[in-house]
Image: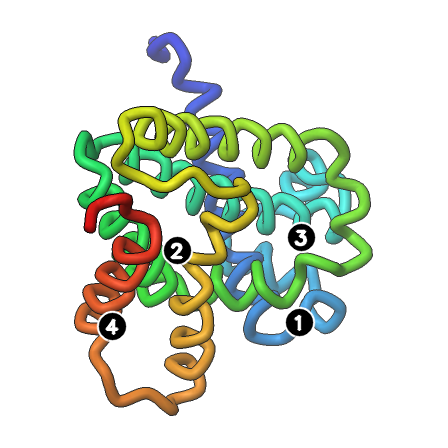
């Protein structure tokens, strides 16, 4: 007898295996150049299964993109919300971001390169809802520490720039092989810089 929910779990696992296979193929060859049969072979799925779950190759590309965003956002929210102290949260966000990029080069490349592709125009409300919930959770953490007088009150669009702007610049050069500083060392220094910029402590 199947356990309750086992069919749903199996379907999710099948979808994830297809997404992982598609991510590999898309980053290796590009979306246009990738044949659905290649994804079938790598994921050990049928063509019917892929079209049943995703509708088309563009639909699959959208699913790959959204899954990458979902994983990144979920992990970052978990990271920042586990910290009670503002300084620890700031350092945690920067370390998480840099470690995620290092551990997920295929996701990083795909998310950065494909965000303005035509297939993204059909993400509908799903992408917007994900971003809104993500922003709400992150803003709530910052608001708590702003109200407590530990983090400066700034326009909300400045926080991600201060936190991740230097990281992004460093990681761009890191992926090209132009850096000499270890990621952990860079993350620590960026953490100090962000905390100095955001902390109300003197």
Q: Looking at the image, which is closer to me, 112 or 143?
A: 143
What is the C-alpha distance between the residues marked 4 and 1?
Answer: 31 Å
- In the figure, is residue 193 to the left or right of 176? left
Query: Can you give x and y, in whole percent of width and height, for residue 79 in the image?
Result: 27, 39
Q: Looking at the image, which is closer to me, 173 or 33?
A: 173
Disc on the earlier residue, 4 or 3 = 3
Q: Secondary structure at mark 2?
A: helix
Q: Which residue is mark 3?
A: 61
Disc marking residue 30: 1
What is the C-alpha distance between the residues marked 3 and 2?
Answer: 29 Å
Residue at 27% x, 53% y: name it: 195
Q: Residues at badges 3 and 2 in contact (C-beta under 8 Å)?
A: no
What is the C-alpha distance between the residues marked 4 and 3?
Answer: 33 Å
Query: Can you give x and y, in whole percent of width and height, for residue 7 in the image?
Result: 46, 19
- In the figure, is residue 55 to the left or right of 132? right
Q: Secondary structure at mark 4?
A: helix
Compared with 92, 173 (above or below) is: below
Q: Which residue is mark 4?
A: 186
Disc on the earlier residue, 3 or 2 = 3
Question: Quadrant of the rendered structure where residue 167 is?
Answer: bottom left
What is the C-alpha distance between the residues marked 4 and 2?
Answer: 13 Å
Residue at 30% x, 31% y: name it: 145
């Amino acid at each position: 007898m199947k356990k309750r929910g086992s069919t749903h779990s199996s379907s999710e696992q099948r979808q994830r295996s297809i997404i992982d296979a598609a991510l590999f193929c898309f980053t290796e060859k590009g979306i246009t150049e990738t044949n659905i049969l290649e994804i079938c072979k790598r994921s050990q799925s049928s063509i019917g299964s892929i079209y049943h779950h995703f509708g088309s190759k563009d639909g699959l590309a959208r699913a790959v993109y959204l899954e990458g965003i979902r994983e990144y956002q979920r992990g970052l929210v978990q990271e920042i919300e586990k910290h009670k102290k503002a300084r620890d949260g700031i350092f945690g966000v920067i370390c998480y971001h840099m470690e995620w990029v290092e551990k997920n080069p295929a996701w990083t490349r795909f998310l950065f390169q494909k965000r303005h592709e035509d297939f993204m125009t059909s993400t509908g409300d799903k992408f917007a809802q994900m971003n809104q919930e993500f922003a709400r959770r992150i803003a709530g953490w910052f608001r708590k520490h702003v109200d407590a007088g530990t983090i400066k009150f700034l326009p909300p669009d400045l926080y991600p720039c201060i936190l991740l702007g230097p990281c992004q610049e460093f990681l761009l050069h890191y992926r090209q092989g132009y850096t000499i500083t270890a990621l952990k060392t860079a993350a620590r220094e960026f953490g100090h810089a962000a905390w100095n910029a955001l902390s109300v402590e003197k």
